[in-house]
Amino acid sequence: MQTRRNILRGLGVAMATPWMESGVLGATGGAERLSAPPLRLACLFMPNGVWPDHWTPAGDGESYEITPHLKPLEGLRSEFLLLENLWNQNTVGRNGHWPKVPAWLSGGFVERTTGGDLDSGGTTVDQLLAQKIGHQTPLPSLELGIDAPRTGIDTAGGGFPRALGSFLSWADPKTPVAKEIVPQLAFDRLFRNKRRPVGSGADPKAQEMLTSLQRDDSSVLDAVLDQAKSLRAKGSKTDQARLDEYYESVRSVERRLEASMKPQKRWINEGKFPLDRPVAGLPQTHLEHVRLMLDILVLAFWTDSTRVATFMMGDAQSSQDYGWLPGVKGNFHGLSHHRDIPETRAMYEAIINWHTAQLAYLLTKMKDLKEGDGSLLDHSMVLFGSSLKCGNRHIEENLPLLLAGRGNGTLRPGRRVRFERKTPFCNLHLSLMHRMGVKEESFGDSTGILQGLG
């Protein structure tokens, strides 16, 4: 007898093209079609900062120079804004890495605790958007990552819980949002949730499969249960208690989201999306892992499964070994402390250049997908950057940031935009929220919206 997994695999192409004429996963059955593409927001986090001399260019406006770190994006310079002088003041004078990560999207002041009572200082912008507009799509938001969460206290780095730097998204100051690191499970999450309606006139076998999936009340935590058990076994009693509290808090959030779901107005794209269901487990190479996650992020936007997504390309002190890159010997965090030794710094720079090349991959894919009167990229905002300006010295001021896309006509890319020195990063978050239709008066330590983006 064919299993649910076999059915899913057999329908991999159909699931990846949910808006085809078959109606297998179409936005019928009560959902009303939008008349124009919606606006999406993706936030991509790169750990360990940059080498400032190879990030910050000379020149202004449209005539700035392309630096070595930006070289992989040279062919896309008309598609992004290079943003200068934004920072998170609440991260100054703290640990070099761990508390800066949750503050990247919240601006909050992260408390130093023993790990049993996390306090990130704020709700992140993606999760506030999920709370305000998440009912419009099957998934309020999508959180993707590469590294499994860490436990324990970083005693050598200021005494902060490592969990702080393991999560980019926070539903509230006490509750990090679980990120999916397994591509197949991330792919399935787009189609396993209960909120996606089954289209009328669908293939009977496909409809039976979907109905079965919609009866399955498993959460994203169930999909990584074995990993959770392993992580719990390695932790202290305090860690274990905190993990138990964390897992239950995520289930509680999921239940509330299910209960609040309302009929949706959906955007329906025509045509196929070339992504089959990934195989089980983690990919064999880091490149394949990152590319699959980027493909899934694009798929989530293309199918209007969500309009808010984050991708954590590494945790706060990513120790991913990049020895497979030409001329590189060592891991990301270790090489970030290059001490201005030219040979070591060159390897660190190669890793950063690799990350901007992955951003170029994502933007190119989004630009090539025609949607409505433009492209998927035209109808999106893609924030990319790090919580440190300099990985070697842990500099917090003037964060390395790019904002790509045209934001449904509200952004004018292709420029270097320099704001007043020490402008709150939260001013950008507030500006993006307004473009997404959430007109909050303030966010974090914001002092107003940013001028000059459009």
Image (tube, rainbow, N blue to C red):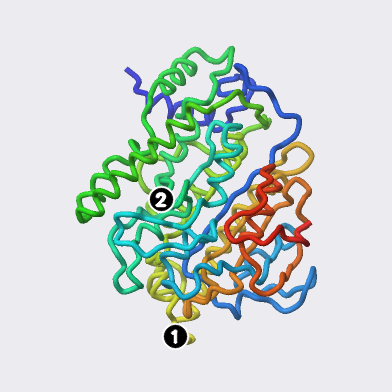
Say which mark, if any, is on residue 294.
none
Question: Residue at 33% of width from left, 36% of height from top?
Answer: 222
Q: Earlier in the sequence, mark 1 or mark 2?
A: 2
Secondary structure under tag 1 reads: loop
Q: Which corner quadrant of the image does residue 188 belong to?
A: top left
Q: Give how far across and how far down residue 159 sits, in percent.
A: 32, 69
Q: Give how far across and how far down residue 26 sits, in percent.
A: 60, 23
Would you name the residue on which mark 1 appears?
A: 339
Q: Nearer the viewer, residue 203 or 228?
A: 228
Rendered view: 53 above or below 94:
below
Q: Which corner quadrant of the image does residue 402 belong to?
A: bottom right
The amino acid beneath tag 1 is: Arg
Q: Give how far across and how far down residue 343 sits, in percent.
A: 46, 84
Q: Is residue 166 left or right of residue 383?
A: left
Secondary structure under tag 2 reads: loop
Q: Nearer the viewer, residue 294 or 396?
A: 396
Rendered view: 222 above or below 427:
above
Say which mark, if any, is on residue 174.
2
